[in-house]
Image: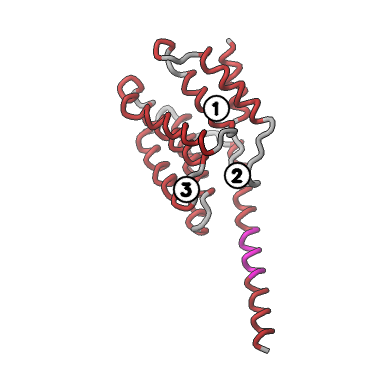
Amino acid sequence: MKTFILSVALLVSAHSLFAQSARYEQTMKTNLAKFDSLKNPDDYVSLAASFERIADAEKTQWLPYYYAALSHILRGFSDTKANKDEVAEKADALIAKAETIEPKNSEIFLLKSMSATLKMLVDPATRWQQYGASVNSNREMAKQLEPNNPRVYFLEGQNLFGTPKEFGGGKDKAKPLFEKSLELFKTYKPAGSLYPNWGEKSTEQMLEQSKS
């Protein structure tokens, strides 16, 4: 009888975990689909908050924290009126939570690089010395962890694209990196359906700009 009760309890527990997992996955997919329709800064903030609520509810999932941080960073890049330092600080706090759950992850190091870039853009001429090393070292760590991650080369190309020629940047230096990124996107397979898979369209756009 005890064995029967234990078996039933295990079945109920397994069913509950499966249902919870299914809800989590569906909610995440619904949120991820919203990235294609974001139109203004408030949309980014709202989406970041939604991902953060999922993360705080799940507690053991790093991806919601990742996407919450990404939402803030993308807002910082797209909103000329945003206080980039404040946006980056919000992203950094979320990145830290994601890294506690999932250390040594290529995508998380790329977020660190993007956040440092955001801070640097406040005043590139004076802040390069303060944040440039972090931009590059975090991206290089991402490359070491996942050499075939196309976003590594997209972000490297993007940084070179915006760097003056006299400092080693420019379109000519960026173009091969965009080409490499697109080549890797052809065969790149995320580790799961919820894992990061963004950047291909942006890489195509940047490649076109580097040709002009």
- Mark 1, secondary structure of its residue: helix
Residue 158 vs 40, above or below: the answer is above
Q: Earlier in the sequence, mark 3 or mark 2?
A: 3
Q: Residue furthest front?
A: 144
Where does the image place residue 58, in percent across and percent down from the top left?
A: 52, 58
User: Please, what is the three-letter code of the amino acid marked with disc 3?
Assistant: Pro
Q: Are marks 3 and 2 in contact (CB under 8 Å)?
A: no
* Residue 194 at least partly seen: yes
Q: Secondary structure at mark 2?
A: loop
Judged by its main secondary structure, the magenta piece is helix
The Cα–Cα distance between marks 1 and 3, rounded to whole angstroms, is 21 Å
Task: Give the mark, 1 or 2, whose residue is nearer the N terminus.
Answer: 1
Q: Residues within 10 Å of mark 2 (few under 14, many from 20)?
A: few
- Reading the image, the residue beneath label 3 is 103
Residue at horizontal 54%, vertical 48%?
63
The residue that disc 2 covers is 195
Alpha carbon distance from label 1 to label 2:
18 Å
Q: Which mark is residue 29?
A: none
Task: Verify whether residue 110 appears in magenta.
Answer: no
Circle on res. 153: 1
User: Of marks 1 and 3, which one's residue comes earlier in the chain?
Assistant: 3
- Between 177 and 69, the residue placed more toward the observer is 177
- x then y, percent, for residue 54: 52, 54
Q: Amino acid at mark 1?
A: Tyr
Label 1 with label 2: CB-CB less than 8 Å: no
Disc 2 residue type?
Answer: Tyr
- Highlighted range, magenta: 14-22
Q: Residue at x 40, y 29 (%)?
A: 81
Relative height, residue 17 to residue 128 (above, below): below
Please report the residue visible at 63 percent of the width from the left and 53 percent of the height from the top.
25
Q: Is residue 205 above or below residue 186?
A: above
Q: Position of residue 106 (x, y in %)?
A: 52, 39
